[in-house]
Image (spheres, rainbow, N blue to C red):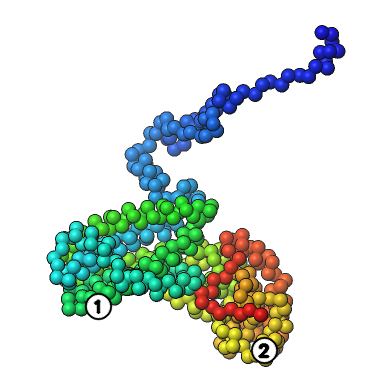
Amino acid sequence: MNFLERIKMPKKEPEELPIAAREPVSWIEISDSVSCKYQFEADGRLSVKVIDDSRPVYFKVVESFRNKFFPSGYPYSVNEGYLRYTQFRVLQHCCSAALSVLSTQSLLIAAGLRPTPAQATVVSWILKDGMQHVGKLICSNMGSRMDSEPKRWRILADVLYDFGTGLEVLSPLCPQLFLEMAGLGNFAKGMAVVAARATRLPIYSSFAKEGNLSDLFAKGEAISTLFNVIGLGIGIKLASTVCSSMQGKMVIGPILSAVHVFCVIEEMRATPVNTLNPQRTALIVANYIKTGKISSPADLRYQEDLLFPGRLIEEAGSVKVGRPVHKALKPSKLYKLKDIFPEEKFLLNREEKWTDMILEHSASGEDALRGWLVAAYASSMERSSSQADDDIFRDAYEKVNLEFSPFLSKLQAKGWHTDRFLDGTGVRFAW
Protein backbone atom coordinates (compact mmCIF):
# COMPACT_ATOMS: atom_id res chain seq x y z
CA MET A 1 0.00 0.00 0.00
CA ASN A 2 1.54 3.29 -1.09
CA PHE A 3 1.53 6.54 0.82
CA LEU A 4 -1.41 8.11 -1.09
CA GLU A 5 -3.65 5.12 -0.44
CA ARG A 6 -2.93 5.36 3.24
CA ILE A 7 -4.05 8.97 3.31
CA LYS A 8 -7.32 8.25 1.48
CA MET A 9 -8.31 5.39 3.75
CA PRO A 10 -10.81 6.51 6.44
CA LYS A 11 -9.49 6.46 9.95
CA LYS A 12 -11.05 3.95 12.31
CA GLU A 13 -12.75 5.51 15.29
CA PRO A 14 -12.09 3.78 18.62
CA GLU A 15 -14.87 1.35 19.28
CA GLU A 16 -17.17 2.42 22.14
CA LEU A 17 -17.41 -0.18 24.83
CA PRO A 18 -20.85 -1.53 25.62
CA ILE A 19 -22.42 -0.09 28.76
CA ALA A 20 -22.07 -3.34 30.68
CA ALA A 21 -18.31 -3.42 29.96
CA ARG A 22 -17.57 0.08 31.26
CA GLU A 23 -15.70 0.55 34.50
CA PRO A 24 -18.02 1.78 37.30
CA VAL A 25 -17.34 5.33 38.42
CA SER A 26 -17.07 5.65 42.20
CA TRP A 27 -15.88 8.18 44.76
CA ILE A 28 -15.93 8.73 48.53
CA GLU A 29 -17.43 11.75 50.29
CA ILE A 30 -16.74 12.65 53.93
CA SER A 31 -19.11 14.97 55.76
CA ASP A 32 -19.82 15.42 59.49
CA SER A 33 -17.84 12.32 60.51
CA VAL A 34 -19.69 10.19 57.94
CA SER A 35 -17.85 8.51 55.04
CA CYS A 36 -20.02 7.39 52.14
CA LYS A 37 -19.05 5.64 48.91
CA TYR A 38 -21.02 6.81 45.86
CA GLN A 39 -20.96 4.71 42.70
CA PHE A 40 -22.65 4.87 39.32
CA GLU A 41 -23.69 1.36 38.38
CA ALA A 42 -23.51 -0.02 34.83
CA ASP A 43 -27.19 0.77 34.24
CA GLY A 44 -26.73 4.39 35.31
CA ARG A 45 -28.15 4.11 38.85
CA LEU A 46 -26.37 5.85 41.75
CA SER A 47 -25.73 3.64 44.78
CA VAL A 48 -24.66 4.94 48.20
CA LYS A 49 -22.93 2.89 50.87
CA VAL A 50 -21.96 4.14 54.33
CA ILE A 51 -18.34 3.14 54.99
CA ASP A 52 -17.77 4.79 58.36
CA ASP A 53 -20.09 6.68 60.71
CA SER A 54 -18.35 7.88 63.86
CA ARG A 55 -21.15 10.15 65.05
CA PRO A 56 -22.67 9.61 68.50
CA VAL A 57 -25.82 7.47 68.65
CA TYR A 58 -27.88 10.56 69.47
CA PHE A 59 -27.08 12.17 66.11
CA LYS A 60 -27.86 8.96 64.24
CA VAL A 61 -31.27 8.72 65.92
CA VAL A 62 -32.05 12.37 65.18
CA GLU A 63 -31.15 11.97 61.50
CA SER A 64 -33.21 8.80 61.25
CA PHE A 65 -36.20 10.60 62.79
CA ARG A 66 -35.78 13.56 60.45
CA ASN A 67 -35.63 11.33 57.38
CA LYS A 68 -38.83 9.53 58.38
CA PHE A 69 -40.92 12.48 59.57
CA PHE A 70 -39.61 15.52 57.68
CA PRO A 71 -39.62 16.17 53.90
CA SER A 72 -36.57 15.24 51.86
CA GLY A 73 -34.06 18.07 51.77
CA TYR A 74 -35.37 19.69 54.96
CA PRO A 75 -34.94 22.54 55.88
CA TYR A 76 -34.18 23.82 52.36
CA SER A 77 -37.16 22.14 50.70
CA VAL A 78 -39.84 23.92 52.79
CA ASN A 79 -40.85 27.50 53.40
CA GLU A 80 -40.19 29.44 56.57
CA GLY A 81 -42.24 28.46 59.62
CA TYR A 82 -42.51 24.72 58.97
CA LEU A 83 -40.61 23.65 62.12
CA ARG A 84 -42.70 25.85 64.42
CA TYR A 85 -45.85 24.59 62.72
CA THR A 86 -44.76 20.97 63.27
CA GLN A 87 -43.79 21.52 66.91
CA PHE A 88 -47.24 22.79 67.84
CA ARG A 89 -48.90 20.17 65.63
CA VAL A 90 -47.24 17.42 67.66
CA LEU A 91 -48.62 18.79 70.93
CA GLN A 92 -52.02 19.39 69.35
CA HIS A 93 -52.35 15.75 68.25
CA CYS A 94 -51.34 14.46 71.68
CA CYS A 95 -54.01 16.60 73.40
CA SER A 96 -56.65 15.70 70.83
CA ALA A 97 -56.07 11.96 71.17
CA ALA A 98 -56.03 12.13 74.99
CA LEU A 99 -59.33 14.04 74.96
CA SER A 100 -60.80 11.39 72.65
CA VAL A 101 -60.11 8.65 75.19
CA LEU A 102 -61.62 10.64 78.08
CA SER A 103 -64.74 11.56 76.09
CA THR A 104 -65.34 7.98 74.98
CA GLN A 105 -64.96 6.69 78.52
CA SER A 106 -67.50 9.27 79.71
CA LEU A 107 -69.96 8.34 76.95
CA LEU A 108 -69.88 4.68 77.89
CA ILE A 109 -70.37 5.50 81.56
CA ALA A 110 -73.34 7.71 80.67
CA ALA A 111 -74.79 4.84 78.66
CA GLY A 112 -74.69 2.63 81.76
CA LEU A 113 -71.42 0.80 81.09
CA ARG A 114 -68.23 0.70 83.11
CA PRO A 115 -65.49 0.38 80.53
CA THR A 116 -61.78 0.00 81.09
CA PRO A 117 -59.52 2.65 79.46
CA ALA A 118 -58.46 0.12 76.82
CA GLN A 119 -62.09 -0.54 75.88
CA ALA A 120 -62.70 3.19 75.60
CA THR A 121 -59.83 3.48 73.12
CA VAL A 122 -61.21 0.70 70.89
CA VAL A 123 -64.83 1.83 70.94
CA SER A 124 -63.86 5.44 70.12
CA TRP A 125 -63.52 4.44 66.46
CA ILE A 126 -67.10 3.15 66.37
CA LEU A 127 -68.88 6.08 68.02
CA LYS A 128 -67.70 8.54 65.36
CA ASP A 129 -70.59 7.54 63.07
CA GLY A 130 -74.21 8.52 63.31
CA MET A 131 -74.82 12.25 63.71
CA GLN A 132 -71.27 12.93 62.60
CA HIS A 133 -72.29 12.27 58.98
CA VAL A 134 -74.97 14.97 59.18
CA GLY A 135 -72.38 17.48 60.38
CA LYS A 136 -70.11 16.53 57.50
CA LEU A 137 -72.86 17.12 54.93
CA ILE A 138 -73.73 20.56 56.32
CA CYS A 139 -70.11 21.72 56.57
CA SER A 140 -69.32 20.55 53.02
CA ASN A 141 -71.42 23.46 51.65
CA MET A 142 -68.88 25.97 52.98
CA GLY A 143 -65.90 24.83 50.89
CA SER A 144 -65.37 28.14 49.07
CA ARG A 145 -65.11 29.99 52.37
CA MET A 146 -62.48 27.51 53.53
CA ASP A 147 -60.43 28.19 50.39
CA SER A 148 -60.47 31.91 51.18
CA GLU A 149 -59.73 31.64 54.92
CA PRO A 150 -58.14 28.22 55.58
CA LYS A 151 -56.50 29.37 58.83
CA ARG A 152 -59.73 30.63 60.37
CA TRP A 153 -61.62 27.48 59.45
CA ARG A 154 -58.82 25.27 60.74
CA ILE A 155 -59.07 26.97 64.13
CA LEU A 156 -62.87 26.76 64.02
CA ALA A 157 -62.59 23.03 63.27
CA ASP A 158 -60.66 22.39 66.46
CA VAL A 159 -62.97 24.58 68.54
CA LEU A 160 -65.91 22.54 67.22
CA TYR A 161 -64.04 19.32 67.95
CA ASP A 162 -63.38 20.39 71.54
CA PHE A 163 -66.99 21.50 71.95
CA GLY A 164 -68.21 18.09 70.83
CA THR A 165 -65.68 16.34 73.03
CA GLY A 166 -66.71 18.50 75.99
CA LEU A 167 -70.33 17.46 75.59
CA GLU A 168 -69.27 13.83 75.59
CA VAL A 169 -67.13 14.27 78.70
CA LEU A 170 -70.05 15.90 80.55
CA SER A 171 -72.62 13.30 79.45
CA PRO A 172 -72.38 11.23 82.70
CA LEU A 173 -73.74 14.25 84.61
CA CYS A 174 -77.10 13.84 82.84
CA PRO A 175 -77.41 10.23 81.64
CA GLN A 176 -81.09 10.77 80.81
CA LEU A 177 -79.95 13.09 77.99
CA PHE A 178 -77.28 10.70 76.74
CA LEU A 179 -78.64 10.45 73.17
CA GLU A 180 -79.02 14.21 72.78
CA MET A 181 -75.57 15.07 74.12
CA ALA A 182 -73.81 12.29 72.24
CA GLY A 183 -75.64 13.19 69.01
CA LEU A 184 -74.85 16.92 69.28
CA GLY A 185 -71.26 16.17 70.18
CA ASN A 186 -70.78 13.92 67.16
CA PHE A 187 -72.55 16.48 64.97
CA ALA A 188 -70.00 19.15 65.98
CA LYS A 189 -67.13 16.72 65.51
CA GLY A 190 -68.41 15.79 62.04
CA MET A 191 -68.26 19.46 61.00
CA ALA A 192 -64.80 19.68 62.52
CA VAL A 193 -63.56 16.70 60.51
CA VAL A 194 -64.67 18.21 57.18
CA ALA A 195 -63.22 21.65 57.98
CA ALA A 196 -59.90 20.17 59.12
CA ARG A 197 -59.54 17.96 56.04
CA ALA A 198 -60.64 20.68 53.61
CA THR A 199 -58.05 23.16 54.92
CA ARG A 200 -55.19 20.65 55.02
CA LEU A 201 -54.24 21.02 51.35
CA PRO A 202 -53.88 24.86 51.23
CA ILE A 203 -51.88 24.77 54.47
CA TYR A 204 -49.49 22.10 53.20
CA SER A 205 -49.25 23.92 49.86
CA SER A 206 -47.99 27.04 51.60
CA PHE A 207 -44.92 25.11 52.80
CA ALA A 208 -44.18 23.30 49.51
CA LYS A 209 -41.11 25.12 48.22
CA GLU A 210 -39.99 22.68 45.52
CA GLY A 211 -43.26 21.17 44.33
CA ASN A 212 -42.90 18.53 47.05
CA LEU A 213 -46.53 18.60 48.16
CA SER A 214 -46.92 14.81 48.24
CA ASP A 215 -43.79 14.44 50.37
CA LEU A 216 -45.04 17.11 52.79
CA PHE A 217 -48.43 15.46 53.00
CA ALA A 218 -46.96 11.99 53.60
CA LYS A 219 -44.55 13.16 56.30
CA GLY A 220 -47.30 15.21 57.93
CA GLU A 221 -49.52 12.15 58.12
CA ALA A 222 -46.64 10.15 59.61
CA ILE A 223 -46.21 12.74 62.37
CA SER A 224 -49.99 12.78 62.99
CA THR A 225 -50.14 9.00 63.30
CA LEU A 226 -47.16 8.74 65.65
CA PHE A 227 -48.30 11.43 68.06
CA ASN A 228 -51.93 10.36 67.96
CA VAL A 229 -50.76 6.98 69.25
CA ILE A 230 -48.70 8.72 71.95
CA GLY A 231 -51.73 10.84 72.83
CA LEU A 232 -53.90 7.74 73.14
CA GLY A 233 -51.36 6.33 75.56
CA ILE A 234 -51.46 9.53 77.61
CA GLY A 235 -55.27 9.42 77.56
CA ILE A 236 -55.32 5.82 78.79
CA LYS A 237 -52.96 6.74 81.63
CA LEU A 238 -55.08 9.75 82.61
CA ALA A 239 -58.30 7.73 82.42
CA SER A 240 -56.76 5.14 84.78
CA THR A 241 -55.51 7.67 87.32
CA VAL A 242 -56.38 11.36 87.60
CA CYS A 243 -59.42 11.22 85.31
CA SER A 244 -60.97 8.05 86.71
CA SER A 245 -63.50 10.30 88.47
CA MET A 246 -65.79 12.93 86.99
CA GLN A 247 -64.11 15.64 89.04
CA GLY A 248 -60.75 14.76 87.51
CA LYS A 249 -62.15 14.95 83.98
CA MET A 250 -63.68 18.37 84.66
CA VAL A 251 -60.25 19.67 85.70
CA ILE A 252 -57.99 17.97 83.12
CA GLY A 253 -60.44 18.21 80.17
CA PRO A 254 -60.52 22.05 79.95
CA ILE A 255 -56.74 22.19 80.35
CA LEU A 256 -56.19 19.75 77.47
CA SER A 257 -58.73 21.64 75.37
CA ALA A 258 -57.09 25.02 76.03
CA VAL A 259 -53.65 23.66 75.12
CA HIS A 260 -55.15 22.04 72.01
CA VAL A 261 -56.70 25.28 70.69
CA PHE A 262 -53.61 27.32 71.59
CA CYS A 263 -51.42 24.94 69.59
CA VAL A 264 -53.68 25.19 66.54
CA ILE A 265 -53.62 29.00 66.69
CA GLU A 266 -49.81 28.96 66.85
CA GLU A 267 -49.68 26.50 63.94
CA MET A 268 -51.77 28.81 61.81
CA ARG A 269 -49.75 31.87 62.82
CA ALA A 270 -46.62 30.09 61.61
CA THR A 271 -48.15 29.16 58.23
CA PRO A 272 -47.17 31.50 55.33
CA VAL A 273 -50.20 31.11 53.02
CA ASN A 274 -49.30 32.56 49.60
CA THR A 275 -52.72 32.87 47.94
CA LEU A 276 -54.60 36.16 47.73
CA ASN A 277 -57.78 36.71 49.71
CA PRO A 278 -59.38 39.98 50.88
CA GLN A 279 -57.40 40.26 54.12
CA ARG A 280 -53.98 39.38 52.69
CA THR A 281 -54.51 41.64 49.67
CA ALA A 282 -55.44 44.54 51.94
CA LEU A 283 -52.34 43.96 54.10
CA ILE A 284 -50.06 43.82 51.02
CA VAL A 285 -51.47 47.10 49.70
CA ALA A 286 -51.41 48.82 53.12
CA ASN A 287 -47.75 47.91 53.70
CA TYR A 288 -46.86 49.01 50.17
CA ILE A 289 -48.58 52.38 50.60
CA LYS A 290 -46.88 52.99 53.97
CA THR A 291 -43.37 51.70 53.26
CA GLY A 292 -43.07 51.25 49.50
CA LYS A 293 -42.04 47.63 50.07
CA ILE A 294 -43.69 44.34 49.13
CA SER A 295 -44.43 41.97 52.00
CA SER A 296 -43.78 38.26 51.55
CA PRO A 297 -46.17 35.55 52.81
CA ALA A 298 -43.79 34.98 55.74
CA ASP A 299 -43.90 38.71 56.58
CA LEU A 300 -47.68 38.81 56.69
CA ARG A 301 -48.38 35.61 58.64
CA TYR A 302 -48.21 37.32 62.04
CA GLN A 303 -50.22 40.35 60.85
CA GLU A 304 -53.28 38.35 59.85
CA ASP A 305 -56.35 38.47 62.06
CA LEU A 306 -57.20 34.77 62.32
CA LEU A 307 -60.54 35.13 64.11
CA PHE A 308 -62.03 38.24 62.47
CA PRO A 309 -60.47 38.50 59.00
CA GLY A 310 -63.15 40.80 57.59
CA ARG A 311 -61.99 43.98 59.32
CA LEU A 312 -61.46 47.01 57.08
CA ILE A 313 -57.93 48.44 56.78
CA GLU A 314 -57.98 52.20 56.32
CA GLU A 315 -54.48 52.45 54.78
CA ALA A 316 -55.64 50.04 52.04
CA GLY A 317 -58.73 52.09 51.20
CA SER A 318 -61.21 50.33 53.57
CA VAL A 319 -62.22 48.06 50.70
CA LYS A 320 -65.20 45.73 51.07
CA VAL A 321 -65.50 42.91 48.53
CA GLY A 322 -68.45 40.77 47.56
CA ARG A 323 -71.54 42.91 48.04
CA PRO A 324 -74.22 42.39 45.38
CA VAL A 325 -74.17 44.91 42.55
CA HIS A 326 -77.73 46.13 43.25
CA LYS A 327 -76.74 46.96 46.84
CA ALA A 328 -73.33 48.47 46.12
CA LEU A 329 -74.25 50.59 43.09
CA LYS A 330 -77.10 52.66 41.80
CA PRO A 331 -78.01 51.95 38.14
CA SER A 332 -77.16 55.51 37.15
CA LYS A 333 -73.62 55.14 38.45
CA LEU A 334 -72.84 51.79 36.87
CA TYR A 335 -72.04 53.10 33.39
CA LYS A 336 -70.16 56.09 34.79
CA LEU A 337 -67.81 53.76 36.68
CA LYS A 338 -67.32 51.63 33.56
CA ASP A 339 -66.13 54.78 31.79
CA ILE A 340 -63.62 55.49 34.58
CA PHE A 341 -62.22 51.93 34.53
CA PRO A 342 -62.39 50.91 30.86
CA GLU A 343 -61.80 47.22 30.11
CA GLU A 344 -61.11 46.49 33.79
CA LYS A 345 -62.62 43.52 35.62
CA PHE A 346 -63.52 45.50 38.70
CA LEU A 347 -65.74 48.40 39.71
CA LEU A 348 -65.14 50.74 42.65
CA ASN A 349 -67.73 52.81 44.43
CA ARG A 350 -66.86 55.10 47.34
CA GLU A 351 -69.27 55.02 50.28
CA GLU A 352 -69.10 57.09 53.46
CA LYS A 353 -67.17 54.50 55.53
CA TRP A 354 -65.79 52.09 52.96
CA THR A 355 -65.15 51.48 49.26
CA ASP A 356 -67.14 48.76 47.52
CA MET A 357 -65.19 46.67 45.02
CA ILE A 358 -67.19 44.42 42.72
CA LEU A 359 -65.26 41.90 40.66
CA GLU A 360 -66.16 40.45 37.30
CA HIS A 361 -66.73 36.71 37.18
CA SER A 362 -63.34 36.00 35.54
CA ALA A 363 -61.30 38.47 37.64
CA SER A 364 -57.94 37.19 38.86
CA GLY A 365 -55.70 38.16 41.74
CA GLU A 366 -54.00 40.74 39.51
CA ASP A 367 -57.34 42.45 38.85
CA ALA A 368 -58.14 42.52 42.57
CA LEU A 369 -54.71 43.96 43.36
CA ARG A 370 -55.10 46.68 40.75
CA GLY A 371 -58.52 47.64 42.07
CA TRP A 372 -57.28 47.61 45.66
CA LEU A 373 -54.37 49.91 44.82
CA VAL A 374 -56.72 52.34 43.07
CA ALA A 375 -58.98 52.37 46.13
CA ALA A 376 -56.02 52.93 48.47
CA TYR A 377 -54.61 55.82 46.42
CA ALA A 378 -58.10 57.34 46.02
CA SER A 379 -58.66 57.18 49.79
CA SER A 380 -55.32 58.90 50.40
CA MET A 381 -56.07 61.61 47.79
CA GLU A 382 -59.53 62.18 49.22
CA ARG A 383 -58.10 63.25 52.58
CA SER A 384 -55.99 65.98 50.95
CA SER A 385 -58.24 67.03 48.05
CA SER A 386 -61.68 68.51 47.52
CA GLN A 387 -62.21 66.88 44.10
CA ALA A 388 -65.25 64.80 43.27
CA ASP A 389 -65.04 61.02 43.73
CA ASP A 390 -64.97 60.38 39.98
CA ASP A 391 -62.01 62.72 39.41
CA ILE A 392 -60.13 61.22 42.36
CA PHE A 393 -60.68 57.73 40.98
CA ARG A 394 -59.36 58.82 37.56
CA ASP A 395 -56.18 60.29 39.08
CA ALA A 396 -55.63 57.22 41.25
CA TYR A 397 -56.23 54.92 38.27
CA GLU A 398 -53.62 56.77 36.17
CA LYS A 399 -51.10 56.52 39.02
CA VAL A 400 -51.67 52.78 39.40
CA ASN A 401 -51.27 52.20 35.65
CA LEU A 402 -47.79 53.74 35.81
CA GLU A 403 -46.46 51.60 38.66
CA PHE A 404 -48.50 48.39 38.58
CA SER A 405 -46.17 46.30 36.37
CA PRO A 406 -43.09 46.60 38.63
CA PHE A 407 -45.34 46.19 41.68
CA LEU A 408 -46.76 42.93 40.30
CA SER A 409 -43.32 41.59 39.31
CA LYS A 410 -41.95 42.16 42.82
CA LEU A 411 -45.05 40.58 44.32
CA GLN A 412 -44.65 37.42 42.26
CA ALA A 413 -40.93 37.32 43.07
CA LYS A 414 -41.87 37.23 46.77
CA GLY A 415 -43.80 34.00 46.14
CA TRP A 416 -47.39 35.25 45.91
CA HIS A 417 -49.81 33.44 43.58
CA THR A 418 -51.59 36.18 41.65
CA ASP A 419 -53.45 34.00 39.14
CA ARG A 420 -56.56 33.81 41.33
CA PHE A 421 -58.37 35.73 44.05
CA LEU A 422 -60.18 33.72 46.73
CA ASP A 423 -63.01 35.88 48.03
CA GLY A 424 -65.08 33.12 49.61
CA THR A 425 -68.76 33.56 48.91
CA GLY A 426 -68.27 37.00 47.36
CA VAL A 427 -70.74 37.97 44.63
CA ARG A 428 -69.32 38.70 41.18
CA PHE A 429 -70.90 40.23 38.09
CA ALA A 430 -70.87 39.33 34.39
CA TRP A 431 -71.74 41.51 31.41
Q: Quadrant of residue 177?
A: bottom left
Q: Nearer the viewer, residue 259 or 149?
A: 149
Q: Can the viewer see residue 185 in this picture?
A: yes
In the image, residue 94 sits, relative to residue 334, either above or below, namely: above
Badge count = 2
In this view, which residue lies farthest toward the right?
4
Q: Quadrant of residue 184?
A: bottom left
At 62% from the left and 23% from the top, the residue drawn is 17
In this view, which residue lies farthest toward the top?
1
Determine whether the residue tagged by mark 1 lies in a helix, strand or loop.
helix
What's the mark number on residue 180? 1
Q: Residue 225: x, y in percent?
A: 34, 55
At 49% from the left and 72% from the top, the residue drawn is 144
Please state which amino acid type lies under the numbered disc 2.
Lys
Give whichever of discs 1 and 2 has the lower sequence position. 1
Q: Nearer the viewer, residue 181 or 357?
A: 181
At 49% from the left and 66% from the top, the residue drawn is 301
At 57% from the left and 60% from the top, the residue drawn is 415
Q: Residue 170: x, y in percent?
A: 21, 74
Q: Residue 88: x, y in percent?
A: 37, 60
Q: Nearer the viewer, residue 58 or 347?
A: 347
Quadrant (top left, top right, bottom left, bottom right) of the C terminus: bottom right
The answer for how far apart the CA atoms under marks 1 and 2 are is 54 Å
Q: Residue 230: x, y in percent?
A: 28, 55
Q: Which residue is mark 2?
A: 333
Badge 2 crowding class, 10 Å Cα cut-off, few under 14, some 14 to 19, many 20 or more, is few
Q: Can the viewer see residue 305 in this picture?
A: no
In the image, residue 3 sits, relative to residue 302, either above or below, namely: above
Quadrant (top left, top right, bottom left, bottom right) of the N terminus: top right
